[in-house]
Image (cartoon, grey):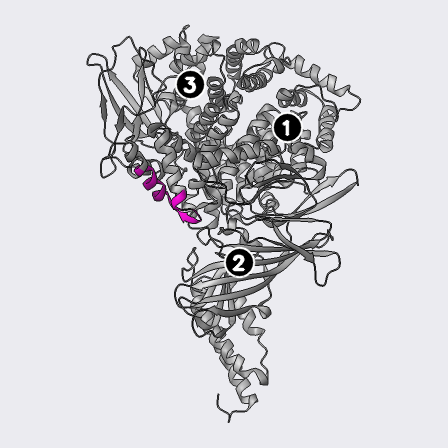
């Protein structure tokens, strides 16, 4: 700086420089289509105040702004790789006393190592106010420690980047300490760091708590951070709050001391965590109670809930430690943390979240009441707890490198949870049920072109959220089950253990799992040396869909020719050459019936260029014996046979020998033949002849398979003139099983096999819908007994396992008085599972004005329905024949309002589409909805995949109606 220039001259020159800089910034940022960034920088330039004593800083500022414009063009969706966090020190003060102003604020001190030379620090921040005047940056490691500082900041709202341009270049190999003061509103949007509440009836007041939910990318809403799963680092968390509350986080408390300046406030510091991804960080300020569990020689285990629900924690607190012990033995690795807290959150947008050491749950997923929760509720709770605790190894100990491999934690946790629940509760016989349920879910979703691979490219945050679906969870689980069954126990367990040990506290991708499993399989000899898991499993995880295996037998040569194509519901699309899978072929014959042997007798292979190849199977029986492929439905594919083989299968099923085919394979045949009827591979005459055997069936799985398929037909046919035939057919089909389970009568305590309770509940639900025998009168009798109780909230004579059916029947046939009675029970209930049952039943009404009123209640934040539960209520209305039309219109008229209600939580909005898509079946309505979607693009931002799916499902319904409706009716009439 020249000493001969006076301050006025320098000020003029600096102002001129800023004007020129503004012009260049505008041109550059508008070129890169960054209008929001453009506004922010221009605002910063306009706010600069120059003072004579700070001219040196002005030069630095201008230099920094030039750097900012150079870096503002960075628009890649991933963080730059120049820096890596080594440790976070979070200090957060939460204020819950004033309902008019819920806030939090604090500092994030991040130790950062430079891996490359760089002039800026790029991390994530969203909706946070960062006090830029107090940001500090200093070098603390490496030679020649130098002062450093942040000269300017830039925001990239597209990717939530907060870019800090530094005074000095950060040098590779050196360590820096970045201190960022921040504050924000404690929101009510169920993501980030947010508030939840419950009503304390004893004190007659609402009580507030705070809780986090960061998966997949919402840690950035709570503190500035490197918010990607690959950036693991230890965390030291310190929470400040009023002394009447408790503080919880991932780790145990290290120290609590009084706040230095705020009366009655405390600081609680927690022990330093193990290396952890930001999405697994968790903390809460609350006044909850807890129930401790005994876990000999293990971690401290506690289950937390609001004080007026702590008595509903007994089952989870007893079950959880058993789960942890099972996984320690299964994986051969001890749980690495000193404690586990299970925490029931009154407001929670998903089922549960596996935060390391502080696992959070929706109340329905953790709390269980003997008086109000059904067996189904208990099993769902068990599956959820087992799933979340499996994540403590798969997800937390070993974390996927990027969300592409989300399934590496979700698919594995879904599968091993089924093994765990089966081990702890063998009397439930739940493993086959869960396996079938998973397959039924993916057969539907993955037969759509709009589906996606298990391992899929992720290029924006909305795509991460859309990946939390049946493909990552259920299909991921199903392909692991397939691999477990073709590898055998020893190879599978050894491979998993090796993978966990090799990548503990690190990040991994699916190839790392394949490598560990291949080594184990070759060592034990369960896989030929010239086969490797990667080649086989990539065909299942890297491409969309699943195969239809066509089996054409030559009864003279006793051979069968097998070919494969991708199975698609959209019959306008050609299947030929559409993908190839390595299919493990297990099969058995009518004579051998060795269904339990799931090791492949042969493989359908793909060529090196990925084309499918036909396979010939030899030594099959003659024309008097059937063959069944896919023993125990061990792999996710469908099988279509030639006419003679179907004929033989139908004969066996419709005879006294039907039980010679295992339960899960009977369910497989039902599902396959009804799908083939839908898409035209088989006539409905054949499909209905096969399922006609259900008159004899007394097991859960075949009925579940049949009901899932009949439900889809019901939702279309009930809107047509020929519904009377379908109704008579269903009524005739289920009458024998209804009589077998002794109707709706309360016989549950005498049922020995637990899955028969689920069967009875399912059959009763269909029987009351179709007015079979005494179902409706008995349901109404249960209701009248309940209505006559002096204290209906305290005493409910309706059997727990059929309450959903009784309540729905009551509301469907009753008046507004019955509706109000049940609505009052909802408001008074203290049990989340019971509240969910009532919410669903309230949508069963046939009164248009009541349904319209209910739709308004659902999305009214001042009403009693929590945001997390609104989708259940909407779905309940939309599933009924009258409610569907009202719900569809309401959704289309109010989509922008609903989107704002969910604060653009895309997974919540898209859940509302599911019942709508299943009931549109004519071209006019399909085209109308298509036009609506085009006109509402802004509301569906981030939900593009779900919208594609919805339109595709509607199109397949239209195709079915145009192609199959008449034939389906003709096939049913002779059976009546």
Magenta segment includes 657: no
Q: Position of residue 56 (x, y in %)?
A: 52, 82
Q: Which residue is mark 1?
A: 837
Q: Viewed as shown, does residue 743 lie left or right of 627? A: right
Span highlighted in magenta in the image:
501-519
Q: For marks 3 and 2, give the one nearer the viewer.
A: 2
The residue nearer to you, when weighing 602 against 449, is 602
Q: For marks 2 and 1, give the one nearer the viewer.
A: 2
Question: How far is disc 3 from disc 2 in space, using C-alphas?
Answer: 55 Å
Residue found at x 53% / y 12%: 734
Q: Is residue 430 visible?
A: yes
Q: Position of residue 74 (x, y in %)?
A: 42, 62
Residue found at x 25% / y 17%: 553
* Outermost left residue: 557
Residue 208 numbered tag: none
Q: Position of residue 722 (x, y in %)?
A: 50, 16
Q: Quadrant of residue 642?
A: top left
Say what secondary structure mark 2 lies in. strand
Q: Sequence order check: which comes first, mark 2 or mark 1?
A: 2
Say what secondary structure mark 3 lies in. helix
The residue nearer to you, when weighing 594 against 706, is 594
The residue nearer to you, when weighing 952 against 447, is 447
Q: Sequence order check: which comes first, mark 3 or mark 1?
A: 3
Q: Are marks 2 and 1 in contact (CB under 8 Å)?
A: no
Residue 670 numbered tag: 3
Q: Is residue 453 visible?
A: no
10 Å crowding of disc 1: few (<14), some (14-19), many (20+): many
Q: Sequence order check: which comes first, mark 3 or mark 2?
A: 2
Q: Position of residue 896 (x, y in %)?
A: 58, 45
Q: Which residue is mark 2?
A: 88
């Amino acid at each position: 700086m020249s000493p001969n220039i006076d301050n006025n001259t320098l000020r003029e020159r600096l102002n001129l420089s800023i004007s020129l800089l503004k012009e260049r910034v505008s041109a550059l940022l508008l070129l890169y289509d960054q209008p929001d960034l453009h506004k922010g920088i221009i605002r910063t330039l306009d706010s600069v105040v120059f003072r004579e004593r700070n001219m040196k800083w002005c030069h630095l500022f201008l230099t920094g702004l030039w750097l900012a414009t150079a870096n503002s063009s960075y628009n890649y969706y991933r963080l730059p790789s120049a820096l890596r966090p080594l440790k976070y020190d979070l200090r957060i003060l939460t204020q819950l006393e004033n309902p008019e102003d819920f806030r939090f604020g604090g500092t994030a001190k991040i130790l950062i190592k430079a891996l490359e030379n760089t002039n800026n620090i790029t991390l994530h921040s969203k909706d946070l106010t960062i006090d830029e005047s107090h940001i500090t940056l200093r070098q603390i490691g490496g030679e020649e420690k130098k002062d450093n500082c942040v000269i300017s900041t830039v925001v990239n709202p597209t990717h939530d980047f907060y870019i800090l341009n530094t005074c000095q270049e950060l040098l590779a190999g050196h360590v820096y300490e970045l201190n960022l003061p921040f504050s924000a509103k404690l929101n009510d949007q169920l993501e980030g760091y947010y508030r939840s509440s419950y009503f304390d009836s004893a004190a007659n007041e609402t009580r507030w708590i705070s809780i986090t939910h960061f998966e997949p990318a919402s840690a950035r809403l709570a503190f500035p951070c490197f918010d990607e799963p690959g950036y693991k680092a230890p965390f030291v968390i310190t929470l400040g709050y009023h002394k009447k509350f408790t503080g919880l986080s991932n780790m145990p408390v290290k120290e609590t001391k009084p706040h230095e300046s705020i009366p009655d406030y405390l600081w609680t510091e927690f022990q330093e965590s193990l290396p952890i991804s930001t999405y697994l960080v968790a903390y809460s300020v609350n006044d909850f109670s807890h129930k401790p569990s005994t876990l000999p020689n293990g971690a401290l285990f506690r289950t937390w809930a609001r004080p007026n629900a702590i008595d509903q924690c007994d089952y989870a607190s007893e079950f959880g430690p058993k789960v942890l012990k099972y996984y320690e033995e299964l994986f051969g690795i001890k749980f690495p943390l000193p404690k586990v807290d299970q925490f029931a959150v009154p407001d929670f947008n998903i089922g549960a979240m596996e935060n390391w050491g502080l696992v959070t749950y929706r109340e329905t997923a953790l709390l269980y009441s003997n008086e109000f929760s059904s067996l189904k509720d208990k099993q769902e709770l068990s599956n959820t707890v087992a799933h979340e605790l499996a994540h403590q190894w798969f997800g937390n100990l070993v974390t996927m490198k990027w969300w592409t491999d989300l399934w590496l934690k979700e698919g594995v946790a879904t599968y091993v949870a089924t093994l765990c629940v089966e081990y702890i509760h063998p009397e439930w016989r739940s493993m086959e049920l869960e396996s079938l349920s998973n397959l039924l879910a993916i057969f539907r979703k993955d037969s759509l072109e709009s589906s996606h691979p298990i391992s899929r490219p992720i290029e924006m945050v909305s795509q991460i959220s859309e990946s939390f679906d049946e493909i990552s969870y259920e299909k991921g689980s199903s392909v692991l089950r397939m691999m477990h069954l073709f590898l055998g126990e020893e190879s599978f367990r050894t491979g998993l253990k090796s993978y966990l040990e090799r990548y503990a506290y690190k990040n991994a991708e699916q190839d790392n799992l394949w490598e560990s499993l291949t080594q184990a399989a070759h060592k034990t000899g369960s896989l030929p040396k010239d086969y490797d898991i990667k080649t086989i499993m990539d065909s299942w995880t890297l491409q969309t869909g699943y195969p239809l295996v066509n089996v054409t037998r030559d009864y003279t040569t006793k051979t069968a020719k097998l070919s494969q194509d991708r199975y698609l519901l959209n019959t306008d699309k050609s299947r030929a050459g559409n993908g190839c899978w390595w299919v493990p072929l297990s099969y058995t014959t009518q004579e051998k019936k060795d269904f339990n042997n799931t090791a492949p007798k042969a493989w359908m292979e793909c060529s090196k260029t990925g084309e499918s190849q036909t396979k010939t199977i030899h030594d099959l029986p003659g024309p008097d014996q059937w063959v069944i492929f896919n023993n125990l439905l061990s792999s996710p594919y469908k099988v279509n046979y030639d006419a003679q083989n179907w004929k033989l299968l139908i004969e066996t099923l419709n005879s006294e020998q039907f039980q010679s085919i295992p339960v899960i394979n009977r369910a497989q045949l039902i599902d396959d033949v009804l799908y083939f009827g839908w898409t035209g591979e088989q006539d409905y005459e054949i499909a209905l002849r096969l399922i006609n055997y259900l008159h004899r069936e007394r097991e859960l799985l075949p009925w579940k398979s049949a009901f899932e398929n009949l439900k889809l037909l019901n939702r279309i046919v009930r809107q047509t003139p020929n519904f009377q035939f379908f109704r008579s057919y269903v009524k005739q089909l289920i009458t024998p099983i209804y009589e077998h389970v002794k109707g709706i009568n309360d016989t549950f305590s005498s049922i020995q096999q637990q899955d028969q309770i689920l069967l009875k509940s399912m059959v009763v639900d269909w029987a009351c819908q179709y007015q079979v025998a005494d179902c409706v009168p008995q349901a109404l009798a249960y209701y009248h007994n309940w209505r006559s109780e002096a204290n209906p909230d305290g005493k409910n004579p309706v059997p727990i396992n059929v309450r959903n059916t009784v309540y729905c029947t009551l509301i469907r046939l009753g008046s507004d008085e019955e509706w109000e009675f049940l609505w009052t029970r909802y408001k008074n209930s203290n049990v989340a599972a019971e509240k969910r049952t009532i919410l669903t039943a309230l949508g069963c009404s046939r009164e248009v004005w009541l349904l319209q009123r209910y739709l308004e209640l659902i999305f009214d934040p001042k009403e009693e329905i929590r945001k997390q539960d609104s989708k259940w209520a909407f779905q309940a209305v939309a599933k009924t024949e009258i409610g569907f039309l009202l719900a569809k219109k309401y959704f289309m008229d109010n989509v922008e309002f609903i989107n704002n209600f969910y604060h653009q939580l895309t997974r919540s909005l898209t859940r509302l589409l599911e019942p709508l898509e299943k009931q549109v079946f004519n071209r006019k309505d399909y085209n109308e909805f298509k036009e609506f979607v085009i006109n509402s693009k802004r509301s569906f931002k981030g939900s593009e995949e779900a919208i594609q799916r919805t339109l595709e499902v509607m199109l397949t319904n239209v195709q079915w109606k145009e192609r199959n409706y008449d034939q389906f009716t003709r096939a049913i009439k002779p059976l009546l």
